[in-house]
Amino acid sequence: MQPPTLKQIADLVGCSKNTVSLALRNSPRISKATRVRVNKVAQEMGYAPNARVNEAMKYVRTHKKKRIAETLGILVDWPAAQKSDLAYHQHLQLFFNSFEKRAEELGYGFDYLFISSPGMTEKRMDSIIRSRGIRGVVVMPMSGGPARLHMDLSRVASVQLGRTLWSPRIDTVAADDADSVYLATKVLHRRGYRKIGYFFSRWALAQSLNRLEMGALYSQKHVEGIDNIPIGISENQKTQKDITDAGKLEEEFIPWFKKYKPDAIICLGVSVKAILEDNMGLNVPEDVGIVQYDYVYKPGVEFAGIDHQKNLQGAYAVERLTTKIAHSMFGLPESPIEVSFPVRWVDGPSIKQLN
């Protein structure tokens, strides 16, 4: 007896062959009720999928050349003229890579727009965006912290990654910085740490709109049994460039550490570890534990930390942007939305179990 065809199933269910095909593959493009009905009828009729045919069709679908619908703009306010100039910045690279990958999957191209490159002005960038026919722009985190962008976004759909664009107000995709500090505190507490210190640069606090500090204060109030060590802040580190200046960090970190003697620190990580081990003769994690509040994997530099899931943030920013384009949602939103991504713990050798 010959197995039923897709057309026979479709005629019995009362739908198209394409709907039957999608339903049998459990595609989310088909409603759950239709999927259940189609699969039930197919089973009753004795339908059995051909595994080899399915595999071949899957290959065809996934390897079909996608037509580029249009180009999305990636607006970068960092001292760079091209993407390779920022190869050192792992956080931005995660955003870039996830944005590119999801854009390609959805059939969109992308164009990097370096607003701080030599000779570039915001007015000139407006002209470039119009001349290239770009209708959707994602704004990367601003290098100098919270800033105002004097560009005309009235003709484009826009989304920002992070919370560093104060004006104009547009849709935002970001992680919860306060939750990252709270989660790190809870894990340290479970590992037996009680003298937990928090050390942030003024630049990092600005980047988070002070959510890092709020997370520390909330943790000290709600995590029982930890010492309320005053939050350490490097006031000298006010810009991205200052972050790489070890001298500015040492000047404020060492006196703070000697005064309060924390047994674990929630901080950026790499520079603090170098100061503790190279300047102060301490070992991580034997003498003091370190947790990175914004963890990004770096080969050969292992830490425990909080992953902000930037890969998911970048992908979602594309989805939000393309949805806005599809629905002609151009210009500044009357009520900007903010999507806050959950953070997750990443274990590492920079802390240990104390009890």
Image (spheres, rainbow, N blue to C red):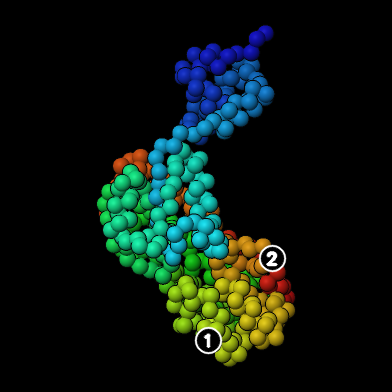
Among the two numbered marks 1 and 2 on one chain, the one whose residue lies closer to the N terminus = 1
Inter-mark Cα distance, 1 to 2: 27 Å
- Residue drawn at (47%, 83%) of the image: 236
Q: Position of residue 192 (x, y in %)?
A: 68, 76
Q: In the picture, which quadrant includes the C terminus?
A: bottom right
Query: Dot 2 surroundings within 10 Å: few (below 14), some, or many (20 or more)?
Result: few
- Residue drawn at (62%, 87%) of the image: 261
Vertical comparison of 124 with 4: above or below: below
Query: Given the current orientation, which residue lies at the most extreme top position?
Result: 1
- Residue drawn at (45%, 33%) of the image: 67
One can see residue 17 in this view: yes
Instruction: Judge from the rendering whether residue 287 lies leftward or rightward of residue 7; answer left or right.
Output: right
Identified by mark 1, the residue type is Glu
Instruction: Judge from the rendering whether residue 7 lies leftward or rightward of residue 317; answer left or right.
Output: right
Task: Give the label on residue 252, or none.
Answer: 1
One can see residue 348 in this view: no
Q: In the picture, which quadrant includes the N terminus?
A: top right
Query: Given the current orientation, which residue lies at the most extreme front position?
Result: 119
Identified by mark 2, the residue type is Gly
Quarter of the image for residue 160 reads bottom left
Q: Position of residue 337 (x, y in %)?
A: 36, 55
Query: Dot 1 surroundings within 10 Å: few (below 14), some, or many (20 or more)?
Result: some
Mark 2 element type:
loop
Q: Which residue is mark 2?
A: 300
Q: Position of residue 48 (x, y in %)?
A: 65, 20
Quarter of the image for residue 54 reads top right
